[in-house]
Amino acid sequence: MPTHEPDRCETGPSLERILGLIDPGMLDVVVAPRGTGVPVTDVVLHDPGEEREDDGAPAAAGLILLAVGVEAASPEALDVLRAADRAGAAAVVMRPGARGPRPELVEAAGRGRTALLTRRPEQGWTEVLGRLRTALVHSAPAGTAGMAGLRPGDLSGLANTVAALVGGAITIEDPQSRVLAYSRLDHEPDPMRRLTILGQEVPRWRVDELRASGFFRTLWSTEDVVRLPADDRYAERLAIAVRHGSEVLGSIWAAADGRPLAEDAAAALRTAARAAVPHLSHHQTWGLAAARAREGAVHALLRGMSGPRKKPGSRRMGRTRWWSRRRTTGGERRRTTGGEPTRTTRRARPRGGEPGRPRGGTRGVPGGGCWMCSRSRPPRTGRGV
């Protein structure tokens, strides 16, 4: 499929690059009338019921629209595609359905300007949205040269880099105030930082204090740095929210680490918040998925260690008790299987010495059996029954 020159009025990574950064096979390109070189500005969920009827669909120039609930084989798919094309969308993604896209839909997409894509049935919309947005932010240029060399999702490296820029201790937290990463400790941390790092989250009582004071309301509603003055207990702190569009991904906190923060600490935090977007997006999409996979593997391992209960009489584990298996000099075995003891007449090969001679550990016990049960069992002679 040829890749055409993108429109000059639009900027952003190409659709081809976005699709190359997600899992192969997650999305299928049905028709791309302008090729896959069209620029993409954002990925949004699309609700056909919210379209304006006066001027057509809302402006969606450069957007990838995820048409949740729309099947490519349904009659309404054609209306959704035409509305997205009028709005200037880069692409629209639909559920393929059992029969796939209708021929009329494919023909209409070929005459328009909006690419038609379908998602695989086993992929959920939430996963598709996360992967596309992560690919989009990964395609954006890095904020600073020091952060450009970090691998995706390297939150610890990001925290150490930001700490060097602001001259203080850094913690990166999710919206629930759980610690995702923190910088190296060059000085003795204040009590709050110590509690936060050891507990891997901000103490609940401290979260309640900040929520009651309105600090979190200010933090989540602004794109600028918010200052938390020092008091008798804790050092000064600066915080900024990390957001992708209207979605809050987390926050970056800078605390005075035995010395005042740098004069340009606020400017460095603004730059760090922009550079942290792809890393926190990567953590949300791939990091959490990997964590769930590890947790599932641990649970499977624990279930395998306990194992399912075998049926009575099974040759492996079974319900045979170790104290019920007794070898006599003639190779006789007794096995308890939940009922009365049973006898077997399997002939055993002698392990050195003469038949009937007791082995080590049973010296002096008649018949060479277990000393605990030798009183109730008369000695036997011979090599078997």
Image: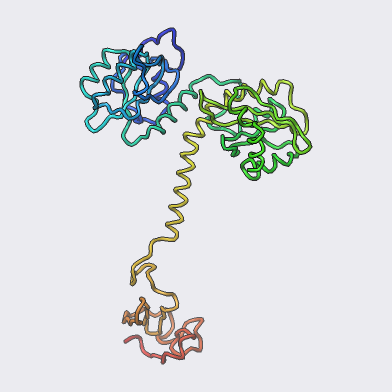
Q: Check the picture and name the quadrant holding the C terminus.
A: bottom left
Query: Is the residue 364 above or below the residue 92 in the image?
Result: below
Please, is residue 137 above or below residue 201 in the view?
Answer: above
Relative image position of residue 157 (x, y in whole percent): 61, 32
Image position of 133 with respect to 325: above or below = above
Tell which residue pokes out farthest to the top in this image: 8
Which quarter of the image is occupied by the N terminus?
A: top left
Number of residue marks: 0
The figure's colour scheme reads: rainbow
Q: Quadrant of residue 47?
A: top left
Residue 55: image quadrant is top left
Please state the horizontal and vertical placement of residue 7, each as a whole percent of the image.
40, 9
Q: Residue at x 28, y 22 (%)?
A: 30
Residue 161 location in percent, x, y?
64, 28
- Give x and y (percent) for residue 79: 28, 19
Residue in front for this viewpoint, 151 or 109: 109
Answer with left or right where residue 181 lies relative to residue 139. right
In the image, is 241 to the left or to the right of 120? right
Which of these two is toward me, 177 or 27?
177
